[in-house]
Amino acid sequence: MSDTSARRTSEWPFRPPCLSIDLEVGLRSGRIRQLAAVRGDSGERLHCRGGDLAAALARLDELAEGCRFVLGHNLLAFDRPHLAAVAPRLRLLGLPVVDTLWLNPLAFPRHPYHHLVKHYQDGGLRRSQRNDPLLDAQLTLDLLDDQVVALRQRQRDDPELMLAWHWLTTRAQRSAAVDGLFAMLRRRLRPSDTEARQAIGCLLADRGCAQHALRVVDEAAASGWSLAYALAWLSVAGGNSVLPPWVRQQFPATGRLIRHLRDEACGHAACRWCDEHHDARRELRRWFGFSAFRAQPAAADGQSLQQGIVAAGLRGEHLLAILPTGTGKSLCYQIPALSRFTKTGALTVVISPLVALMADQVAGLRSRGIDACVAINGLRQPDLGAMTPAQVASGMHSKSWG
């Protein structure tokens, strides 16, 4: 028996009093073709394949009787708006909502592409068949089950983070179901503003610029889910961590918060984070073990030109650098790229016409234990050539696939 199965056996079966819903909607017509639902507590099912839509919706409303919330994967942005458009008087539309798509980056911040979730784009459910809303409704219940297991473990490991998530994800209207879920997991009511701000401040300590963190805490009440996702990413930052593309698209403030905290130097001499992570010589020592940049070629002020280029790259400036062969041009883009990857998860694309040089640089980085890099060229084997762009598109670096 797996660890997950053992925990489930000892702590529940988890049978939430909810209705898991999934729709199939025509891409061009926007009309509901199929709808399906599964009760989380009784397992009762409904699957309507065309026919009288009004009658199907009436049966859906009957099945929702007695449920405490409605469940779905991308329910808030997709299924619920379609239901509201065709039947705005459905009683189930008045029920609180839990969207497993929104919970996934919290439950699985290190690997947000759960085994039931597709690896990129919209974070849709992974399934073995197409156009099967009933299967997707059941998969959503399965995913919620796994999310509860993961969040229970998170409560044991990091209760302060769970407290912050509880407060941040329940500030908007219609969040009663999410509030109830976190209250069940934490065995506590929603925290006060003072408790939450204190927890967020502690969570940000030493994970970004202290000056910027003060502002983030002050504005936390308006940040909601965006800050919750930023905290989730920060809890695993620097390793094999991914901020899903759909989060960057639907919650662009998440990326801005991470960049503000970790990739914008505050200029205060007393800020340990900025002193450590925005200094070119410190980053050189961190990644390559050298104590100083090459003295030659030198800039007009006599300082190392190599160091000046790296410093400008760390600041995110636009620059053009022309250096002789053998003077360390590679470090000029490798250090800013590696630094930004660990600070924000950002991808850097280096374009080179030299296939052998590309392979040599990747091999050199990996020999130093740096595997957040990969080379793509027309000479790769067909299977690897297709795999690498897909992994890059999903936000995963090479350590994830080989």
Image (cartoon, rainbow, N blue to C red):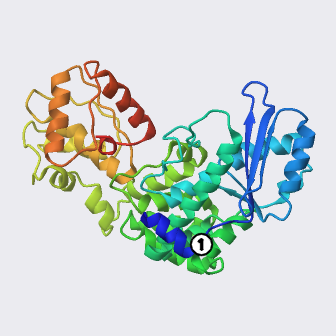
The type of residue carrying mark 1 is Trp
Up-down relation of residue 85 to residue 242 (above or below)? above
Up-down relation of residue 367 to residue 359 (above or below)? below
Up-down relation of residue 58 to residue 68 (above or below)? above
Task: Judge left or right: residue 160 versus residue 135.
Answer: left
SS of the residue under disc 1 = loop
Which quarter of the figure has residue 250? Answer: top right
Q: Quadrant of the N terminus?
A: bottom left
Task: Judge left or right: residue 389 versus residue 22.
Answer: left
Task: Judge left or right: residue 36 versus residue 289.
Answer: right
Residue placed under numbered mark 1 in the picture = 12
Q: Residue at x 69, y 71 (%)?
A: 180
Q: Residue at x 74, y 40 (%)?
A: 23
Task: Judge left or right: residue 207 versus residue 194.
Answer: left
> Residue 174 appears at what percent x and percent y?
76, 62
Which quarter of the figure has residue 334? Answer: top left
> Residue 16 appears at what percent x and percent y?
69, 65
> Residue 343 appears at what percent x and percent y?
35, 53
